[in-house]
Image (cartoon, rainbow, N blue to C red):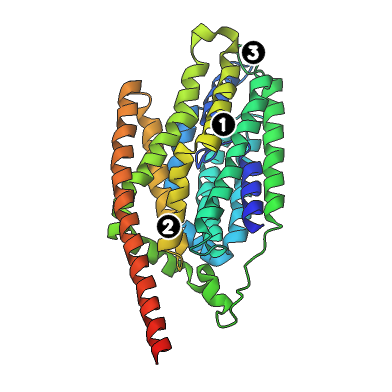
């Protein structure tokens, strides 16, 4: 039930705005809305969508180093709520676009995304064990991906027949999104602070390892993990998820919306592409299986200290996303796809190496336990 509430809360918060991405903000619409807002009469708005996205991912990347310390101080539940509030502030800035509010909001949502995504990974780990981590990760991501269906379905009908997004459409859209974000924050309030262990010999301090370490120790742990062999192997996969999510969440849809061949329906087709991407992710699971496996593997390897591990994952992912948005203005589409293929291949190989090593360690642990049980029974 905790996993359901966590996934549902993030589904409402992210409902249509994508990032891990914006970070879960649908970058296609950020760029499109900003471009069309500059065309409104008597406007002084000169903000750049891709500059905003670069700020978001740059701040997101840097903030991941501070996220474990924040979570160590506030706990995962309050950290998720705080991150959700910052999301809502960013969304509300589009009700009346101003250049300064766009960039300030970009900084805020970058911080909020780092805290939110690291906290929810830590929360998921604290409420799972090695046997349920994969299942709970799958439930979480499945609930999360439904945001692509509902949000893009709304956008498809809202933008239908509009050559550009009008002021009325923009205000309606972001009023709905901000309201859904607020609902997501409220849902998170229903989450339990921690799970009581069935084993009375395990103290609450041992169970809630996030708060058992201070903020400084959490930061030092992040630096130490960054240099370990396992993280270095997994870093290619982390970067791949960043390059890939930037492509489909911001670059691909923007290309569709800017294609003159589609005429007045081009903007609504952004929503249609998002719907089909969402359907593919829910039922095909090609991309989401990668994310689920990463969450499961990190939760297994670092079950005793998960916040720094998830922070490093989000750091690498957001750094790659920021790089993708920066070079998207300069590299042709085929070269952008080539980068994704290279990192996808290397990331897959690195993941297999780490997972194989983890499985061998687990097998040795099981064998040691079995040998001990046999010796006790023989005595």
Residue 168 coordinates in the image, percent (x, y): 71, 21
**The one of 21 and 359 positioned closer to us in this rendering:** 359
Task: Assign a secondary structure to mark 1.
Answer: helix
Query: Image point 52% across, 76% down: which residue?
Result: 206
* Residue 55 visible somewhere in the drawing: no
Q: Which comes sooner in the sequence, label 3 or label 2? A: 3
The residue carrying mark 2 is 298
How would you rate the neighbour count of disc 2 (Cα within 10 Å): few for under 14, some for 14-19, many for 20 or more? Answer: many
Describe residue 102's horizontal placement relative to residue 230 as left or right: right
Query: Image point 33% across, 66% down: which residue?
Result: 361
The N terminus: image quadrant: bottom right
**The one of 76 and 69 positioned closer to us in this rendering:** 76
Query: Image point 68% across, 38% down: which residue?
Result: 178
Q: Are marks 3 and 2 in contact (CB under 8 Å)?
A: no
The residue carrying mark 3 is 162
How would you rate the neighbour count of disc 1 (Cα within 10 Å): few for under 14, some for 14-19, many for 20 or more? Answer: some
Point out the frontmost of discs 3 and 2: 2
Which numbered tag is attached to residue 279?
A: 1
Query: Image point 67% across, 31% down: which residue?
Result: 174
State which quadrant residue 161 falls in.
top right
Task: Assign a secondary structure to mark 3.
Answer: loop
**Relative to 138, residue 29 above or below:** above
Residue 44 coordinates in the image, percent (x, y): 58, 22
Residue 68 coordinates in the image, percent (x, y): 47, 61
Kindly report the distance in space between the C-alpha atoms of the residues bearing marks 3 and 1.
25 Å
**The one of 81 and 301 positioned closer to us in this rendering:** 301
Kindly report the distance in space between the C-alpha atoms of the residues bearing marks 2 and 1.
26 Å
Kindly report the distance in space between the C-alpha atoms of the residues bearing marks 3 and 2.
45 Å
């Amino acid at each position: 039930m905790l996993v359901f509430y966590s996934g549902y809360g993030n589904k409402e918060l992210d409902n249509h705005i994508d990032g891990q991405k914006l970070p879960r903000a649908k970058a296609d619409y950020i760029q499109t809305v900003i471009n069309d807002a500059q065309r409104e009469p008597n406007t002084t708005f000169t903000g750049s969508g891709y500059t905003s996205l670069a700020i978001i991912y740059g701040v997101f990347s840097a903030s991941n180093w501070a996220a474990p310390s924040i979570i160590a101080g506030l706990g995962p539940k309050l950290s998720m709520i705080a991150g959700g509030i910052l999301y809502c502030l960013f969304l509300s800035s589009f009700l009346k676009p101003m250049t300064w509010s766009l960039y300030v909001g970009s900084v805020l949502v970058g911080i909020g995304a780092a805290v939110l995504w690291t906290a929810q990974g830590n929360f998921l780990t604290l409420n799972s064990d090695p046997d349920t981590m994969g299942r709970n990760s799958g439930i979480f991501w499945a609930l999360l991906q439904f945001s692509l269906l509902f949000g893009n379905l709304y956008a498809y009908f809202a933008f239908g027949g509009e050559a550009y997004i009008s002021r009325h459409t923009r205000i309606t859209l972001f009023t709905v999104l901000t309201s859904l974000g607020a609902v997501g924050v409220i849902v998170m309030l229903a989450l339990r602070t921690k799970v009581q262990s069935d084993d009375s010999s395990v103290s609450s301090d041992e169970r809630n390892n996030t708060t058992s370490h201070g903020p400084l120790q959490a930061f030092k742990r992040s630096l130490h993990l960054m240099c370990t062999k396992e993280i270095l192997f997994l870093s290619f996969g982390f970067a791949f998820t960043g390059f890939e999510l930037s492509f489909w969440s911001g670059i691909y849809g923007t290309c569709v919306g800017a294609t003159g061949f589609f005429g007045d329906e081009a903007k609504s087709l952004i929503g249609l592409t998002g719907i089909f991407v969402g359907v593919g992710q829910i039922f095909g699971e090609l991309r989401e299986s990668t994310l689920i496996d990463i969450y499961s593997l990190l939760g297994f390897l670092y079950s005793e200290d998960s916040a720094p591990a998830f922070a490093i994952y989000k750091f690498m992912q957001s750094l790659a996303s920021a790089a993708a948005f920066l070079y998207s203005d300069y590299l042709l589409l085929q070269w952008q796809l080539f980068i994704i293929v290279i990192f996808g291949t290397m990331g897959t190989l690195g993941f297999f190496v780490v997972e194989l090593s983890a499985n061998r360690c687990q097998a040795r642990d099981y064998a040691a336990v079995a040998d001990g049980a046999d010796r006790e029974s023989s005595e």
